[in-house]
Image (cartoon, helix red, strand yellow):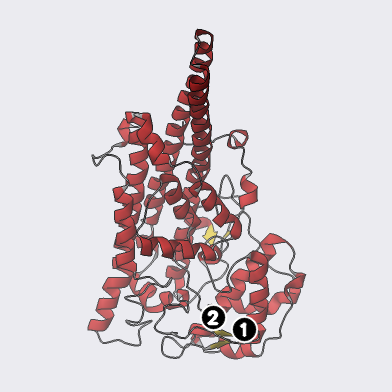
Amino acid sequence: MGDGERFPRSALQIDLDCFFVSEEFGFILEQPATDLPDYYRVWMGLASNLTPLIQTHQLRDLVNEMPVLSPHHLKGHRELRLAHLALGFITMGYVWQEGQHLPAQTLPKSLALPYWLVSKRLGLPPILTYADSVLVNWRLKDPTGDMEIGNLETLFSFPGGESCKGFFLVSLLVERAASSGIQASLYVCLCLYLSLSLSLSIYCISHTLRISLCLIGAFSVMNAVVTCDIISIQKGLYKVGQSLRKMKEIFELMHRHVDPTAFHGTLRIFFSGWRDNPMLPGGLLYEGIVEEPMMLSGGSAAQSSSIQCFDALLGICHDDHAASFLKRMREYMLPSHRQLIETLSGCPPLRDFILSCSSPSLCVNYDSCVSALVNLRSYHLSAVTRYITVPGHRARAMRCPLNGVGSALDETGTGGSSPLPFLKSIRDATQRALISQTHITESTLI
């Protein structure tokens, strides 16, 4: 199956649109809205000018003076997503305008109420998520050009200049690389159901009718169909492996487009949430919504639906703590994206099926996917070291406690986990899924 070859939608028997998944873009929102009705110009004005407003310490005052706008004039999914994105950026800027030492304790009603209502309509929490800042926060400079980093622009940004834009856009392109693998995952899931249902039919018929000679031909045909679906699974896994390797290749662009000092010292605090965060241990009060502060995690790669889809397909078994954290991160995804992960999780266990087939080539293709996911997670570990651990040590050595978040988030990620132990845990769990520990080269694949 060539790089440009796609699985037919009719073969999938699953409407990707119902999951808000695009064949070409995966979980990325295709052709996102770039503007809202004029009624919401104050939201768009603030979100589009966050950096100077934060740097001049004006944002909080302007939000406090902002009228309470109704979200009922928002029409369609794309306008809702853009509103959630804009309000999310404004919220993060409002909370962290004064840095780690003076975070806002309360989100004013002018921001909290419409944000809460928009969030309810989308099924998302009222905080900036990965689904916002990565999957919706983009446009093409030249609409007729290709989707490549030189032709991409973010809709909204934080202080951090080109490093901020680079962080969002490289993450976007990593998600784009995942799209063919997501489609292939659904195809493999369908083939598993077909193969196992036919195998069960053969078993039941043979034991009920004691296999008369006149049935042998029928069984041969059914077994041939099962065999064809094994070949289809191989092809699907090959596409998944290709996709994972492409994701890592694009992830490596982060080194070229994001400066570690800018990321750690300026940008990272604006991804920080108010759950398991030492800077806001009591959470954030949403005025006019609830009487108690809310505890919500900031955006992180753990909120990527793509990665969790591949985990579900390959049957990666994480330890209890990591599994619980990853499952909680699904609350920060669109409900339709969560449903796709659950669909793949409910698929017959792929690894068990492969072991039962005694097919060396199928094992090779499966292990290739697992190895590619291990390599992607190993690279993520090295990125955390480069962008968080090393700059954090350097800042402390230089005694710069006011530089960005200082040491406040060096041991706790923006999503609330301890980044290095967590990433090592999920990387090692992925490694344990390998059927063979031998090195697999692409030349051995179909």
Q: Residue at x 42, y 65 (%)?
A: 325
Q: Residues within 10 Å of mark 2 (few under 14, many from 20)?
A: some
Q: Is disc 2 in contact with disc 1, using a CB cutoff of under 8 Å?
A: yes
Relative height, residue 141 to residue 283 (above, below) = above
Residue 81 to residue 213: above or below: below
Which of the numbered marks, if any, corresponds to residue 294? 2
Badge 1 density bin: few <14, some 14–19, many ≥20, Cα 10 Å: few
Q: Quadrant of residue 367?
A: top left
> Is residue 28 at all visible to an observer of this figure?
no
Relative side of 422 to 162, left or right: left
For the residue pair 254 and 359, the one nearer the viewer reads as: 359
Q: Position of residue 322 (x, y in %)?
A: 37, 62
Q: Amino acid at mark 1?
A: Val
Give left or right: position of 431 versus 95. Answer: left
Q: Secondary structure at mark 2?
A: loop
Q: Position of residue 388 (x, y in %)?
A: 32, 71
Q: How many marks?
A: 2
Instruction: Compare residues 392 and 341 and report the one nearer the observer.
Output: 341
Which residue lies at the image location 59% right of the left edge and 67% below the top edge? 124
Q: Residue at x 24, y 40 (%)?
A: 439
Q: Percent from the top left, x then y, of residue 356?
A: 37, 32
Residue 369 in percent (x, y) is at 37, 43
Mark 1 residue element: loop
Disc assigned to residue 290 = 1
Q: Identify which amino acid the numbered label 2 is placed on.
A: Met
Q: Is residue 300 visible?
A: yes
Q: Quadrant of the C terminus?
A: top left
